[in-house]
Image: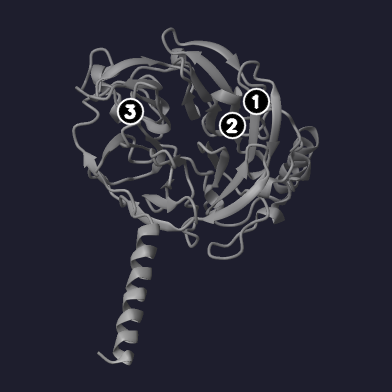
Amino acid sequence: MSKGRIFVVFGGLCFLALCVSAMAQTPTAPNYKFDPDWPKTMPNKWKIGGVTGLAVDKDDNVWVYDRPNDLRDMELKAELTPTIADCCVRPPSMIHIDKAGNVIGSFDPPQGHGMAVDSKGFVYLGNTVKGMNTVRKYDPKTGQMLKEVPRAPETQGGGGEDADAAPAARQPGRGGPGPTGTFPAQGGGRGGANPAAQQAAAAAAAAFLAKYPPTTPMIVGQIEEVRLDEQAHELYAADSSFGGRVMVFDLDTFAFKRGWGAYGHKLSDIDPGNAARVYTPGGPFAKEFRGHLTLNISNDGFVYAADRAGNRIHVTDKQGTFVKEIPVATNTTGGSAGGVMFSPDKEQRFLYVCDINNNHVWFINRQDGKTVGQLGSMGQNGGQFFGLHMIATDSRGNLYTGEVFNGERVQRFLAVR
């Protein structure tokens, strides 16, 4: 063989080796299949409302936080006396489901957003109580509220979208207008708003901001997510005020410790103005978080804050020092970066991000921030999503999802190895 041919063969082998090496270093997306046998049919003729919280406990059983007030009259006919149909009955807002899909417990706290379960079995819920928002600790065995994170004693406009109707005030067979979703109310009709009303609203917003600036050491806006760092004795809450703040409280006393905004901005440096949140999908990212902030904490000590309306995830350390920004389906109008979960391997190689607009679970390589795959599509068949809102994983690698809008259900996907 001539020297030229030897060189060509050698070069080709080197190129092939580089390709194989590159492929070996690029992790492939996880593989899942829909489990049609989980959960079992709900007991007591319950019909689940929109799912606003999802957590797997130390025993790999699943807690589902739902909105019973999403249900309509037509879904509550079995509550009437005498009943006029076989379906259905309003469920409790907290439902405990075991690995086999059976309901093993429940209690009925106020509705809200976000939840976590500690190693002792206590449940932490982002409640909306009389239009105001906080995080509450519950004993699930008794349903007793044990403690709550400090909150502002009022809200701008006097309430939130999940304003609770106490269980005792519910009228049998009478529901609401239907699934409320998790988006702000949409405007409609012709013509502009009354100038006087606009001025009054602007004045009220300015007065509220002066009273409760971004440095306020308590919950001001709606809670979107609750996470626990038990080793550090800390509770993290995603507060939606000012587009979103990461707020950290002592897990034992619930005293405020620290917080930050986009790019690790100190609370005192958060720009509350609307201009700081201007963003066109596909264009430059906003200077501050834009809304519906969720978060999670990795095993290696980083905080992943997902700014849904901003189509991105910000990574910081636990003190709020900014590390990097991860784009998520950046051309999505309405927002793509929902709840964040990690793959169950020790290294947590992947981020699992639920997307309420595209109705996918995105699989993102945690190291380089590149999207490597997706799960699911828009639809109402098993394994599809209509309002994908919550996500969780168990110790065996199985994936759980919760939906709002027309979905109003939980599903399980089994890890395929």
Q: Earlier in the sequence, mark 3 or mark 2?
A: 3
Label 1 amino acid? Phe
Q: Residue at horizontal 63%, vertical 21%?
A: 149
Q: Is residue 53 above or below residue 265?
A: above
Badge number at residue 81: none
Mark whose residue sits in front, 3 or 2: 2
Q: Earlier in the sequence, mark 1 or mark 3?
A: 3
Mark whose residue sits in front, 1 or 3: 1
**Which of the pair 65/161 is nearer the observer?**
65
Residue 187 visible? The answer is no
- Marks 1 and 2 close (CB-CB < 8 Å): yes
Q: Residue at horizontal 23%, vertical 31%?
A: 38
Q: Residue at horizontal 51%, vertical 38%?
A: 298
Badge 3 element: loop
Specify the quadrant of the image occupied by residue 416: top left
Label 3 amino acid? Ile
Classify 10 Å Cα crowding around label 2: few (below 14), some (14-19), many (20 and above). Answer: many
Classify 10 Å Cα crowding around label 3: few (below 14), some (14-19), many (20 and above). Answer: many
Residue 227 position in % (x across, y down): 53, 30
Residue 97 visible? The answer is yes
Q: Is residue 155 above or below residue 3?
A: above
Q: Which residue is mark 3?
A: 48
Badge number at residue 249: 1
**Which of the pair 205/42 is nearer the observer?**
42
Badge 2 element: strand
Q: Residue at horizontal 27%, vertical 25%?
A: 99
- Marks 3 and 2 close (CB-CB < 8 Å): no
Residue 246 position in % (x across, y down): 63, 37
Q: Which residue is mark 2?
A: 237
Badge 1 element: strand
